Amino acid sequence: MNFYEFSLNEKIQKAIAAMDFIEPTPVQEQVIPLLLNEEHRDLVGLSQTGTGKTAAFGLPLLETLDFSTTQTQALILCPTRELCMQIDRDMHQFSKFMDDPGIIAVYGGAGYRPQISALRRGARIIIATPGRLRDLMEKGEVDLSNLAYLVLDEADTMLNMGFKEELDEILADIPTGKQTLLFSATMPPEVARIAKSYMNNPVEITMGFKNAGAANIEHRYFMVHARDKFPALKRLADYYPGIYGIVFCRTRIQARELAEKLAKEGYNADALHGDLSQPQRESIMEKFRSGSLSILVATDIAARGLDVQNLTHIIHYDLPDDMEVYNHRSGRTGRAGKSGQSLAIINMKERFKIRRIEQLIRKPIIETPVPGGREICEQQLMNLVDKIRSTDYNGKLIEPFLPMIAEKLEGMDKEDVIKRVFSMEFNRFLSYYGNVPDLSPVVAEARRKESSFAGSYADKRGRDRNFRDGSRGDRYESTDRRSRGKQAGSADRRDGSDRGRDRGRDRDERSRPVVNENDFTWLTINLGANDRFGKKDLLGVINQQVQGRQVTLGKIVTESTYTRFQVPKDTSDLLEKSLSRISVLGKRIRIKG
């Protein structure tokens, strides 16, 4: 099927041909004929963003306009000024070869006077945000008494943004008998209420499952400690060299600070948030649409209605409180049949949110380790190779310089030239990512196949330990903590006085074996503070590897890149053999005496 089969007038056909519209999207294929042929039938369209909804309702509205009057015949309500401006641009493109159709956009953040002047000249189609439209109606500048068509675009978003009161007031003032078209990505109870209260037996068109995520979007999440979220974001930006995406934050302050940090680190990023003036917002959006910015950091409110083509990634730096908002965010990529990725950076307490989102979008969200230094360097290297292969060169321009280049490179073979060229371009990444730590947190389930060291010390219920840490001062011990606790506790119960507690502590002290430091030797492993590897991690690793054996440890010293610890001489060989066979935090353990 193509657009010529819709029987649109010649001027509209000419406009959409100039826009390279050939085959309608599925939502356009279903909605346009219904609006052209069933004038009074209300419609609920459940469809993701980026599916061509504007053309689906906009082309029929233009086709049915009555040019004999300048009264308002159609009202399109949308949640944000960005979406309002985008619909306005699209509608003017659709009507570029028609006589002036009288399309007026009114939205907050702009002056009242120009909008009122435009309305007084005649507005057959008004595109508006709910807040500004209600203000203009209260001022008596908008007359909807002859309205024939009402379009509610992204109705769920309007309600999520708190426009329930404004919508109810506007809808209550609109006369009955108009044709109402409601478009929404999801169908929460409030949207269903509007459909029931203000629509007449609407036909429902669903593209895919209700609330389902777009099929061509890949969903992944990366679990890190909260303190590692920004390093994880940088790694994702480096792992995807061609990234062109939006990073979503919870607050405007966070969006601004995050964009500033990215910019200082050399990333091509800027922020979109509510503190910006309209000219500032438009300037940033122009840079982003043109590709001058590769990363836009934004809040959900600031990004509502943004219509940017060819986004490759959506990154959820903060998961939304409303799980349906995740769907709106993700739907900004993977449009027009292209693939996209939705990536969430979460901390360990947010895993339950991922499960709820999976139920909502009916798709799995894949747990993925944060890329390590080697993976990032490989990606950047291959990206550089691809750039070299795809670079166009003009032989006539470069040819005069080839003899001079050849002379300069005389004596160097092809392999040597390749090494030097790539080292020149690539040394920054190699030096930065040469020895970075794994950012994935220590989670027993995720790491069990590697080392399973977390569980042995995470149990706070008093499970038996095979060894104890003796690094406090010069004390060496192997006494089980649970036994000591019982002894001290019994003393406390027998005598509630300080004297009773002292006797318990004395008994505890006497239970410790006397150990000679000369019986110990030092071992060193290649994990330290830079790897987020501490004393408890060491205890857990060793405990897991020597199950069934009681081992006494001495002093433990953690440095930036390694950890030194004392063990009895008669167990050092056992520990060297046991630990050298495993990987921890993505690193193969290297241990030496």
Image: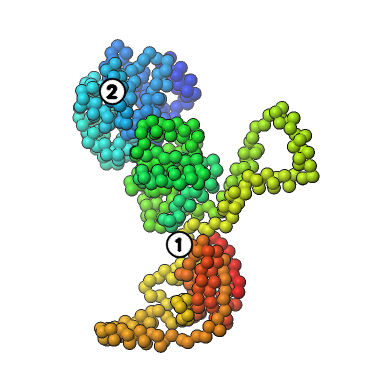
To which residue does mark 1 refer? 443
How far is disc 1 from disc 2 in space, using C-alphas?
A: 59 Å
Quadrant of the snapshot with the C terminus? bottom right
Above or below, comparing residue 570 to residue 100 in the picture: below
Question: How far from the left and from the top, in percent, is residue 445?
Answer: 46, 62
Name which of mark 1 and mark 2 comes first in the sequence.
2
Q: Is residue 183 visible?
A: no
Q: Residue furthest right?
A: 411
Q: Residue at x 48, y 62 (%)?
A: 532
Q: Nearer the viewer, residue 536 or 344?
A: 536
Q: Residue at x 48, y 67 (%)?
A: 534
Vertical comparison of 94 with 384: above or below: above
The residue lying at 59 percent from left, 55 percent from top is 434
Q: Residue 111 at what x, y percent from top left?
A: 30, 26
Residue 223: mark: none
Image x and y of residue 337, in percent: 48, 35
Q: Nearer the viewer, residue 63 or 525?
A: 525
The x, y position of residue 557, in whole percent, is 51, 71
* Residue 226 seen in the figure: yes
Q: Report the residue at 38% width, 23% height from top.
A: 91
The quarter holding residue 414 reads top right
Q: Which mark is residue 113?
A: 2
In the picture provided, is 243 more to the left or to the right than 481?
right
Give the number of marks. 2
Q: Is residue 149 above or below residue 450?
A: above
